[in-house]
Amino acid sequence: MTSNKAQTVATAMLFETGLGFLGVLVAWLGSISLQGRLSFTLDSVLRGIVASLPMILLLLAAYEVDWKPLAKLRRNVEHVVRELFAGCGWMEFLLVSLAAGLGEEILFRGALQPLFISWTTLWIGVILTALLFGLAHAMSTAYFLAATVIGLYFGWLAWAYEDLVAPIVAHAFYDFVALVYVSYRARGEGNRPPAD
């Protein structure tokens, strides 16, 4: 692994892991138990993988649609992946995806969502958390909207299964597939910056 690539992967993993530690701190301050909701069993992992399939299908479909805002979003995402992860392979993508799935879901669905639910109602808590998740991923309006919808889905998974494993695995598995696929697609685009 080259030093630039290693630095990118290490920075991404450190950031995502830091979000997980922030989630643990928020949960502790809010008297929210994470322990009972992190039981990694074969069933819970398989449930997460299956839960990632609709998102993966939507990703693949997004590459078949010629809608201008979606095409611009694809170009922007490909450019970012090309710039940040040039030369990375599946192992680096796997490490970053695992860190993102674990870190982000502990923060958003593990700590913030239960906290917001305790202050409001179930669905207001899920929606507020999804909006924050969307804002955290807001590199464009289209990406904000997509991330918010995905945040709603992850919020529903956490609520429906009363655990964090399904959203963690779904998030990590989707990110891994998306990074591999978008990286592959981006290689065909060369180093062209995103068009306006």
Image: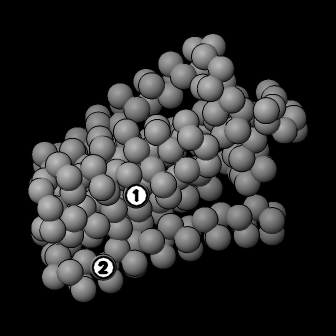
Is any atom of residue 22 visible in this view? yes
Other residues around mark 2 within 10 Å, as few (<14) / some (14–19) / many (≥20): some
Image coloring type:
one colour
Q: From the viewer's perspective, tell me whether residue 125 is left or right of residue 56.
A: left
Q: Which mark is residue 66?
A: none
Q: Residue at x 50, y 19 (%)?
A: 61
Type of the residue with mark 1: Leu
Q: Residue at x 84, y 38 (%)?
A: 193
Camera-side residue: 174 or 31? 31
Q: Secondary structure at mark 2?
A: helix
Asked if 88 appears above or below 174 in the picture, the reply is below
Q: Residue at x 50, y 28 (%)?
A: 59
Camera-side residue: 43 or 13? 13
Number of numbered discs visible in the structure rendering: 2
Residue marked by disc 2: 26
Q: Residue at x 45, y 25 (%)?
A: 58
The Cα atoms of the two marked residues, 2 and 1, are separated by: 15 Å
Residue depth check, mark 2 versus mark 1: number of the one nearer the observer = 1
Type of the residue with mark 2: Val
Q: Position of residue 162 (x, y in %)?
A: 12, 55
Q: Position of residue 50 (x, y in %)?
A: 29, 34
Residue marked by disc 1: 132
